[in-house]
């Protein structure tokens, strides 16, 4: 399995096939283009140097067919919010792009606008014969209900789902211990709200110990982020106030901004979001109020660099690793349908990554507290709750 902590991603243009997924409305091609010719095999029947010899032509056809059969085709169905979120979906795309770089893989993207479209996209990938998709990767827990039905209707098709579990023999489920990584950024937020701290465009208020959490859609998954964050904050000081709210959408920056502004005006020094593109509004509010924010899924001080002066850190979730590992297993012929893979701190599935601009400004004793907490979780000395009611 690929260890993405030890290697910087190389963004590639991908290797999309010349034939798209017919009838897939709203499906955008992956980053194909000028580099396609490097991976495109010769069309069957192309003349060879031998001229018009029929036997040579047959050999060319057979060779091309053999090469085509070795290509692994993947269909990517992203979560609502689409690509360009600087977070969850973009992280998934990093995984498939790295697989394209490392293996003979071609892929197509689908970006649903709403939950009701998931089943349609899943089914169109599964029913396609040109190309015949070896794996359909479904990104996000909201796809689970649709995939439960789709997987049953297409038992010969292999599927991956990220962030949920679908119990079917042809579905590989990949989940994360988000509460573990969230605990670490909770330690960070708890430490900083307890002191006078200024960096970039933000500072803590001297008269309060108060932090906040903004979630996207309420449920057991995002509840894990909230639970871990709250537990980490309370581990620093039980008396720190933790405000929490859910916007009800992963693609509502204005809602995220309104929620965060309310928290900052109520004394929060730091707001952590687990809300996809809705979190962009949290960053906007932090800048306006001169406070701090914590990103999610990717290093958002890089992917949302306009807000790097208020992003203390991000709770990175290696969705890229999940996608890459599933594609690698498919390429190698050992994809396990029905299997559950869980990625936490020991597997480098989640991590606290300090902000590109502000990381160097964070006091070393605060970083030490975060490092100690990480090791305590890995060693089993710290048990992190995954339900907000237990935090």
Image (tube, rainbow, N blue to C red):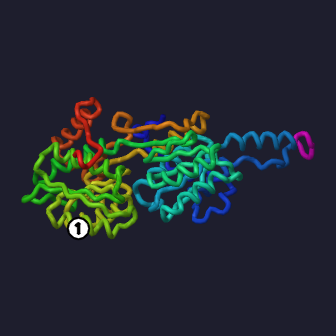
Residue 321, by quadrant, is: top left
Q: Nearer the viewer, residue 241 or 386?
A: 386
* Farthest left residue in view: 207
Q: Residue 74: where, in percent of width, then height?
A: 60, 48
| Above or below for 99 versus 280 | above
14 sits left or right of 247 in the view? right
What residue is rendered at 17% in x and 43% in y? Answer: 366
Decide if residue 72 is in sight here. no
Q: Residue 239: where, in percent of width, then height?
A: 10, 50
* Farthest right residue in view: 53
Q: Residue 306: where, in percent of width, then height?
A: 33, 63
Residue 378, by quadrant, is: top left
What residue is rendered at 72% in x and 41% in y? Answer: 67
To which residue does mark 1 refer? 261
**Tag 1's secondary structure?**
helix
Q: Residue 119: where, in percent of width, then height?
A: 56, 57
10 Å crowding of disc 1: few (<14), some (14-19), many (20+): many
Residue 227: within the magenta? no
Task: Please give the range of residues in magenta.
Answer: 50-56
Q: Nearer the viewer, residue 337 or 93?
A: 337
What residue is rendered at 36% in x and 38% in y? Answer: 344
* Farthest top residue in view: 379
């Amino acid at each position: 399995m690929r260890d993405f902590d030890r290697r910087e991603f190389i963004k590639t243009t991908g290797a999309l096939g010349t034939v798209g997924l017919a009838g897939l409305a709203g499906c955008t091609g992956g980053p194909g283009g000028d580099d396609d010719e490097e991976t495109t095999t010769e069309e069957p029947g192309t003349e060879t140097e031998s001229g018009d010899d029929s036997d040579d032509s047959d050999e060319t056809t057979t060779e091309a067919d053999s090469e085509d059969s070795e290509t692994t085709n993947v269909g990517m169905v992203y979560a609502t919010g689409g690509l360009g979120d600087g977070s969850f979906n973009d992280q998934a795309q990093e995984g498939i792009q790295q697989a394209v770089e490392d293996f003979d893989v071609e892929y197509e993207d689908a970006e649903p606008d709403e939950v009701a479209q998931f089943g349609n996209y899943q089914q169109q990938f599964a029913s396609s014969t040109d190309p015949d998709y070896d794996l359909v990767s479904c990104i996000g827990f909201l796809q689970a209900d649709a995939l439960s039905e789709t997987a049953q209707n297409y038992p010969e098709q292999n599927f991956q789902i990220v962030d949920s579990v679908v119990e079917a023999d042809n579905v590989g489920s990949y989940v994360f211990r988000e509460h573990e990584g969230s605990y670490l950024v909770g330690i960070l937020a708890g430490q900083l709200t307890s002191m006078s701290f200024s960096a970039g465009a933000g500072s803590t208020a001297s008269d309060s110990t108060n932090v906040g959490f903004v979630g996207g859609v309420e449920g057991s998954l995002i509840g894990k982020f909230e639970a871990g964050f709250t537990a980490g904050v309370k581990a620093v000081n039980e008396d720190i106030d933790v405000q929490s709210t859910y916007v009800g959408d992963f693609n509502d920056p204005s809602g995220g901004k309104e929620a965060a502004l309310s928290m900052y005006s109520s004394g929060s020094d730091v707001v952590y979001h687990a809300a996809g593109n809705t979190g962009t509004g949290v960053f906007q509010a932090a800048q306006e109020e001169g406070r701090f924010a914590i990103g999610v899924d990717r290093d958002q001080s890089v992917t949302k660099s306009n807000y790097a002066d208020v992003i203390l850190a991000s709770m990175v979730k290696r969705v890229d690793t999940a996608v890459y590992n599933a594609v690698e297993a498919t390429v190698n012929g050992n994809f396990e349908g029905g299997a559950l893979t869980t990625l936490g701190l020991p597997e480098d599935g989640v991590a606290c990554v300090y902000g590109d601009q502000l990381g160097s400004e964070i006091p070393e004793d605060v970083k030490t507290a975060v490092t100690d907490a990480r090791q305590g979780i890995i060693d089993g000395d710290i048990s992190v709750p995954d339900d907000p009611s237990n935090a």
